Image (cartoon, rainbow, N blue to C red):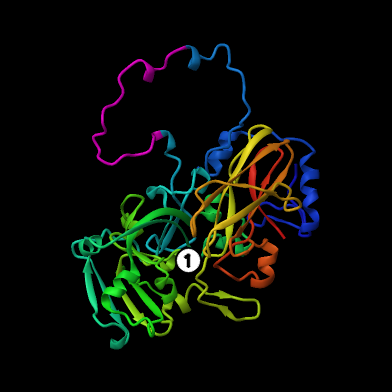
Amino acid sequence: MNFQGHRLGRLVKAPENFIGADAVGTVFNEAKRGRRDFVRGAFAAALAGAGASTASAQSKPAQAGDANILELLAHSKGLGQGVAMEGYGKPSKFEANVQRRISPGLTQTRQSSVSFAPLQSLFGIVTPSGLHFERHHQGWWDVDPTQHRLMLNGSDAALMKTPMVFTVDELMRLPSVSRFHFIECGANTGMEWGNVAVPTCQYTHGMLSCSEFTGVPLKLLLDMAGVDYSRARYVLAEGADGSSMTRTVPMELVESGEVFVAYGQNGEMLRPEQGYPLRLVVPGVQGVSWVKYLRRIEVGDQPYGTKDETLHYTDLLPGGMHRQYSSTQECKSVVTTPSGGQVLLDKGFYQISGLAWSGRGKVKRVDVSVDGGRQWKTAKLQSPVMSKCLTRFTLDWNWDGQAALVQSRAMDDTGYVQPSLAQLRAVRGTRSIYHNNAVQTWLVEAGGEVKNVHLS
C-alpha cells in the first residue's frame, strides 16, 4: 500500500500527513488493496516506546498444551518478597516503558523544557504524580519548606488593609479544599499548528494531566488581609524560581472560590517538579498561570502585562494582529486508544477510549467518528463528570479490518463545540503556537498500524 501521495489530497507520511476533505475515500480504497505484513516488535522499537500495542479483545479457547495454564509458575509455589525496604513504592518492572518523555529539539536546554505524559497508557482520569507532565522555564528546585514564604501585598496601600506573610505550616493549619482539576499547557498540541504530525498521543496531547489538588482558597487569604474587592480587580502571582514567572489572574476567578494555593497533589505533598511546596491552582486556565514555587500574591486594579503575557504566550493572527491574554483552555478531546504508535492485532471488537475536558465547565457530550467525520456516534461518559476536570469517554467498536479515520468531538455545558482543524485554521491561520483545540484524527491502516494524520 503506497502512501507517497501528491499535494492535492492523497495521504502523505509524517511530518506532513494531510488528507484533503475530498479524498477521504481514497484512504479506504487504497487500504482495501491488501494487508501488508509487519514486525510488531520492530515497529514498537522504532517508535521508541510509544506505548503498548492495543491487544485484540476477541475471546479465544485455551490452548490444550499451554504450560502457563497446566503448570504452576514460580510465583505460585514459593514465598514472595517481603515488605519493600524502600519506603516509597514503585511500579512493576514490566511497566517500565510507561514514562514521561521529552521531545528532542523542542527546547534548547533541559532547564527550559517540557516532558509529556503518556496519555495512551493511562486509565480513568487521574494522572499518577510520577507521570504528570512537566513544563519548566528555569529548571525545577527542591525548596526547603521551612524557609519558603508566601507574601500578600497590594500595588496600592488602599487595596489591602494588612499585608501578610505566611509560612507553609501556617497555611496548612487553615481550612482546606481538595478538588480534581486538569492542567494543560497552552502550547499543548502546538506542534500540529506547524503542519507537523508527531507520531503519538503522548506528543500531540501529552502536556496535559489531571490530579486531586489540596490547598487553601486564595479568597480566604485575601479576606484575612482585608482586600478591598470593590477596587482590586486582578491578582499578580509570582514564583520563586529563577525565571520569576509572573501571571495576571482576574479577580472574578478568585472571588468565585475556585482559585487556591495548593500544597498537596494526589494525597501527598506536591512533587518538586510540580512546584513544591506551594503552587497556584487556577482551574480551566492554561498551565502557565498555575505559578509554581509561589512566593507572592499582589492585588491590583488593572492587568499587569508581564513578560509572559505580552512577549510570550501570544499568537500571530492572519491579519497581523497578536492574540493575547488567551488564558481559558477551550473544550477539547482526544482518542487515546487507538492512537498513534499503537497496533490493532486483529479485526473484531475494541473499545475506543479517550479524554475530554473544558476550561469553561463540564463536558456535556462527546461524539466519535471512525470515518473521518462523515458519521458520528455519541460516546459514553464515565463518571465522575466534574467541572474543569478530565472526563473519560468510551465507545464500543467492531473493526472490520479496513482503514478507518478515528476522531472525537467534545461539547461542554456552555454549548461550545470542539472545532475541526479546518475550522480552527480558518480563524487562526497557521502561525499560532498556543490553544490548538482542534479535532484530532488517527488513521487506522488496514494492517493495524495507527498513525497521526491531518484532515484539511
- Quarter containing the C terminus: bottom right
Taking depth in this image into account, of 386 and 144 the one nearest to the observer is 386
| Residue located 30% across and 19% down the image | 79
| Residue located 54% across and 61% down the image | 358
Q: Residue 263 at x, y = what percent?
A: 30, 59
- Quarter containing the N terminus: top right
Indicate the quadrant where residue 234 lies.
bottom left
Taking depth in this image into account, of 89 and 150 the one nearest to the observer is 150
The reply to whether the magenta stretch includes residue 122 is no
Q: Residue 18 at x, y = what percent?
A: 70, 57
Left or right side of 199 for 301: left
Left or right side of 235 for 409: right
Q: Residue 127 at x, y = what percent?
A: 44, 49
Q: In the picture shown, does residue 386 fall above or below 328? A: above
Which residue range is magenta in the image? 71-93
Q: Residue 275 at x, y = what percent?
A: 33, 61
- Disc 1 marks which residue? 286
Q: Is residue 169 visible?
A: yes
Indicate the quadrant where residue 395 lies.
top right
| Residue located 41% across and 49% down the image | 131
Q: Main secondary structure of the magenta part?
A: loop
Amino acid marked by disc 1: Gln
